[in-house]
Image: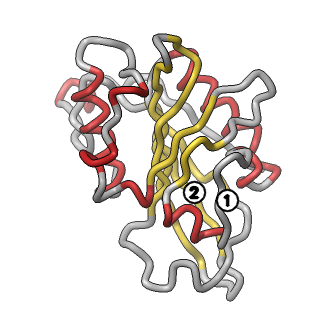
Amino acid sequence: MRHQVSKDLYAYWNRLRGARAAPDRAHIDPAAIRHILADAFIVEVDADGAFPLRYSGARINALWQAEQRGESFVDLWEEQSRRSLSAAMTTVSDGAIPVVAGARTRTSDSARLDLELLLLPLRHFGKTHARMLGSLSAPSPADRLGAFCVDPLELLSMRIVSLTARPGARMADERARPGPRLVVCNQ
């Protein structure tokens, strides 16, 4: 994780999780993460694989200059990225493991915007495979955010986050013996 929003959200989620695979949606306190709420979202895990947004933060809405609540999260991505994104979201839901990814888009004035995506599993009413908490953030809050609409997102890279590591830190044994990685190749 490179962005502070991702690190903060992961740390909060990890504290709530404790020894469980995932915290319950009911335990999420918006006041506790108010400084990153604008970059956060909650996605429903549905049978159709559309992953509708149940909550969409203000900065996410500003990217498309429209409220995204109720919209398909997968549809915000370009066609070539959707299959890999859906597979990653299924991994998060089924395996109860976090995923971090790099994404890119262009604004309507052709400026490039690099983003970081974090996906975290959530339980809902005690049920797994129900929700995901996530963030989609730029390295620093864009001062022109909302001035231009963005193109669909392009998925650049993706990896599973170790549940034993601190966000942004690598442990000595991880450097010596790398774990499995999820690699996306868009050709």
Q: Residue at x 33, y 27 (%)?
A: 27
**Residue 174, located in which quarter of the rendered image?**
top left
- Give the crowd class for mark 1: few <14, some 14-19, many >=20 residues within 10 Å: many
Residue position for label 1: 153
Q: Is residue 116 above or below residue 98?
A: below
Residue at the limit of the structure toward the left, as seen here: 172
Task: Please give left or right for residue 154 compared with residue 130 in the image.
Answer: right
Q: Amino acid at mark 1?
A: Leu
Residue type at the position of mark 2:
Ala
Quarter-of-image position of residue 82: top right
Assign a secondary structure to mark 2.
Answer: strand
Residue annotated with mark 2: 103
Q: Position of residue 173 (x, y in %)?
A: 21, 24
Question: Which residue is nearer to you in this view: 162 or 143?
Answer: 143
Return the residue nearer the eye: 1 or 170. 1
Tag count in the figure?
A: 2
Numbered disc 1: secondary structure: loop
